[in-house]
Image: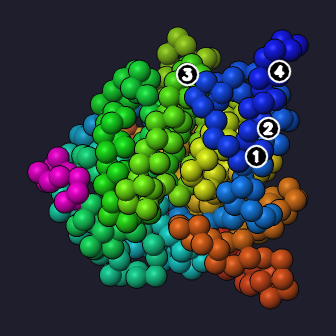
Amino acid sequence: MIDTAIQAQIDQILAKVHQGGRISYDEGMLLYQHADMLDLAEAANARRQQLVPGDVVTYLIDRNINYTNVCVTDCQFCNFYALPGDTSGKGYVNSKLILGKKIEEALQLGSTRILMQGGHNPDLPYEYYIDLVGWIHRTFPAIEINAFSPSEIQYMSEMGGKTWKETLTELKAVGLSGLPGGGGEILDDEIRKRVTPKKIMTDDWFGVMKVAHELGLITTTTMVIGFREELRNRMNHLARLRDEQDDSLKRFGNGFNAFISWTVQIEGTPLGKSRFASEYGATGSEYLRHTAISRIFLDNIPHISASWPTQGAKVGQMALHFGCDDFGSTMIEENVVSAAGAITKVSPVMLPNEIHRQIREAGFVPAQRNTNYDVLKKFGTPEADAELQSIEAITEAATKQGNWAELTLLD
Ligand code: SF4
């Protein structure tokens, strides 16, 4: 039972949210610690309506592609990478032939974007990245290229002796449309130094993104919870993110267009083998609570995506009632959190018809979007639904041909 004085404070904060007001760090912390779940959901939905009015829930048809898993960074939560010189056969650099096949297949399935990330591979020179993005853009001009975490940008910049601005300018010139915002984990160095000490720290992560905003690139931002962090570490991440977003919007009129969080997956990772293994990760309730707090606190980031790949479709569906206005993407392929035990290990794809079912049954109207969150097609009219049938038909045909299995073997 909550103390009546604390409940009165919570009621005041929630009323402020319903009226469209910004809440402070301490108010966010109080909600996080004490607010009733359903009150939080209601306030998060009110914030969603202030930022994204209506009942449409968007999704993206895209494919996650990894160009290499060779990496020197040794993140404690990663089971995806192989060290340079690894003799087990795990390490790879995908050829243009394989990458091209993956993109062709994604286009066949109606994809509008690829999300491409990889390890920090010391054998790949700076020119490799420029050549790769340029080749993809020239060969497949219809696909948006969202690629490279701030940490990869920092790594390739170092390899090429370039500034972040030079690197991002060159990548944009050859066809990069945006950065997916990976590698954020918890943007509080107290936690980063423990779980990802060789990757860039908070200031540099935001530094790279600031340049991306200045250059007009599309960016999203991610967060992972469950590293045995305290609530203050989570709030530190959210508060820094909100401040940086205010600054980017004020200076460049461009900032993060979406936020997505998920819970750390630790199967086969150093964290999973540590004596604290049972204390890592987070429950579905904790994820939903965090989602609601993020939506309420981040009043300057328009879109919040649900994470079905780590939470499963059922919790993803519930997240739509905790302030999310987006159901993420079809993925088609996912190798990073899957390797650490995420649900995508079993099924790395959610077909558009299944995404529609999840969104509709949660009480919303599905709409396909692009990377920039522009609605490409809102479903619910007979014409649009007929279009979905053709997406389903293509998807089923591709599945029957076994294309995904073939590509997995090629890896
Ligand atoms: S999470 Fe990324 S940077 Fe970290 S070890 Fe894995 S591949 Fe490397």
- Residue at left offset 46%, top offset 41%: 243
**Residue pointed to by mark 2:** 15
Q: Give the range drawn in magenta.
A: 157-167
| Label 1–label 3 contact, CB within 8 A | no
Q: Residues within 10 Å of mark 2 (few under 14, many from 20)?
A: few
The C terminus sits in image quarter: bottom left
State the image coordinates of residue 311 (x, y, percent, origin top left).
69, 42
**Residue pointed to by mark 4:** 7
| Label 2–label 3 contact, CB within 8 A | no
The disc, 2 or 3, on the residue closer to the chain's N-terminal end is 2
**Residue pointed to by mark 3:** 232
- Secondary element under disc 1, as helix, strand or loop, is loop
Is residue 35 found left or right of 79 in the rendered image? right
Q: Nearer the viewer, mark 4 or mark 3?
A: 4
- Predominant SS along the magenta part: helix
Is 263 located above or below residue 373 in the figure?
above
| Label 1–label 2 contact, CB within 8 A | yes
Quadrant of res 348: bottom right
